[in-house]
Image: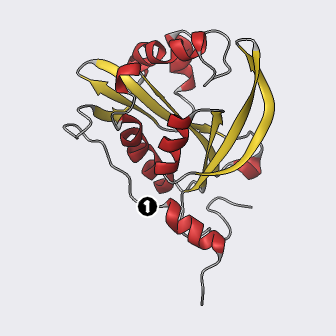
Amino acid sequence: MAESAAEQGRAADLRPLPAGPAGSSTGVEVRPAGVADAAGIAAVYAPYVHSGVATFEGEPPPPAVLATRMTTGLPWFVACAGPEVVGYAYASPHHERAAYRWTVECTVYLAPAACGQGVGSALYGRLLPVLSERGLVTALAKITLPNAASIALHERAGFHQVGVLPQVGFKLGAWHDVGLWARSLVRDLPVPPAGGD
């Protein structure tokens, strides 16, 4: 029996990613983040808030706020060059309504020196399998457009574009579109999902 297009897409999404362990070709260690990493994460994130449109946050959150965000129960990973955090990735709930509980949003931020070095792929190589192991079904990513580097990173990680939200954010004196990318975390959809109705 031939696979449907959706089944073929789920299989393509699940291709292996580099795991990015200590001593990997990226030259960084990728490990689970803890609240002690909040200051390093804040340092990576702040320039994106101040001078970019990758995030629509208006003020850089202090480490204590980021530490609180890390306690949602979903995984966070950091990439470290020695003691310095040079990137991080995490998952957050997509929506508070119950039917969305198997869907998460994924985010990666990198220090400038870590860009183009495979660090983003190494972070997703750790994050996405953990999400799959936890029984989550779909990972989403929102990308402010244009952003060729982020699009390339997400498509290497198996995400594909599913839409564009036009002119949804105003920052730095301009309106911005946000692209929506999605990636399946399972080969076969659970029926009903674990913990379902």
Camera-side residue: 7 or 161?
Answer: 161
Q: Which residue is mark 1?
A: 15
| Residue 16 appears in the rendering | yes
Residue shown at the point (63%, 35%) measured from the top left: 143
Image x and y of residue 197, in percent: 74, 61
Residue 40 image position (x, y, % from top left)? 40, 15
Q: Is residue 73 visible?
A: no
Which quarter of the figure is the N terminus placed in? bottom right
User: Residue 169 in the image: x percent, y percent?
Assistant: 76, 24
Identify the residue shown where x is 73% and y is 47%: 163
10 Å crowding of disc 1: few (<14), some (14-19), many (20+) = few
Quarter of the image where one finds residue 180: top right
Horizontal and vertical percent for residue 70? 52, 27
- Tell me: residue 36, above or below residue 27: above
Indicate the amino acid at tag 1: Arg
The quarter of the displayed image where residue 185 is located = bottom right
